Image (tube, rainbow, N blue to C red):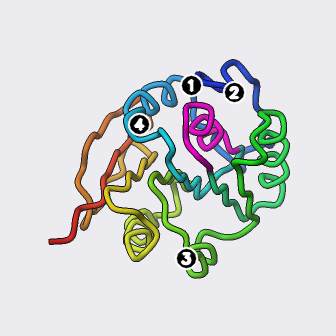
Amino acid sequence: MRVISGLARGLKLSSIDGMETRPTLDRVKEPLFSMLMPYLNDANVLDLFAGSGALGIEAISRGALKCTFTDKNPKCVKVILDNVKKARMEEKSIVKNISFESFLATSKEKFDLVFLDPPYKMGLLDEILSKLKEGHLNDDAIVAVEADDGTNILYDGYTLLKERKYGRVKLFILQLEKEA
């Protein structure tokens, strides 16, 4: 696993061993970031199920202003901290050992771009998307969802900008709808 482009291009990132996380493959990450390029410059990013932090680090490498990484697994948090340090992105990174429920219940911060890549079997995408739009997103915010191929989501309150399939992975790029 590596940073594909930008300031940290080529940097090898660590992840935890075992089946606890599912890092986004380079063959998925490359087209994902091609779709997100117009939204990265100076963005305030949230990597909600950060795992290794690879998506948030890639976003900072490509011009995001900062990233908040959240994961409830302490092993993941240690790996994220190590990867952020290795990438020399400490000043642009906030790493929190917290569940997504607790983070969304307590955070008052608003984000321009959110990476939403929860464990596929959780079945909580619709609930999380609903909670995100309740005060966690700036106007025109983008939510990049990675899900299992068979996943369908309700994106009430969002506009579907793109939907792509890469093997067994489906990407959804959603934009918060403007209030009338």
Image quadrant holding the N terminus, namely top right
Specify which label sits upstream in the sequence, 2 or 3.
2
- Type of amino acid under label 1: Asp
Q: Position of residue 56 (x, y in %)?
A: 61, 44
Could you tell me which secondary element the residue under label 3 belongs to?
Answer: loop
Q: Amino acid at mark 4?
A: Leu
Residue found at x 69% / y 48%: 92
Measure the alpha-carbon separation of dots 2 and 3: 32 Å
Question: Which residue is found at the position 52% from the left and 63% from the top?
Answer: 122
Q: Name the residue tied to disc 2.
A: 1
Q: Tell which tag, 1 or 4, sits nearer the viewer.
A: 4
Which residue was labeled with disc 1? 26
Tell me the mark number nearer the camera, choosing from 2 and 3: 3
Instruction: Give the mark nearest the N terminus, 1 or 2.
Output: 2
Question: x, y (%) of residue 22?
Answer: 63, 42
Does 44 sit above or below residue 86?
Answer: below
Q: Which residues are magenta?
A: 53-66
Q: Residue at x 40, y 65 (%)?
A: 129
C-alpha distance separating marks 1 and 4: 15 Å
Residue 165: x %, y % from top left? 35, 33
Q: Quadrant of residue 64?
A: top right
* 4 and 3 marks in contact (CB < 8 Å): no
The residue that disc 3 covers is: 108
Label 2: how many residues lie within 10 Å, few (<14), some (14-19) or many (20+)?
some
* Mark pair 4, 3: CA separation: 24 Å
Q: Amino acid at mark 3?
A: Lys
Q: Which residue corresponds to mark 4? A: 36
Where in the figure is residue 4, as x and y percent of width and height?
60, 22
Reply yes or no: does residue 118 show up in magenta: no
Q: Give the secondary structure at mark 2.
A: loop
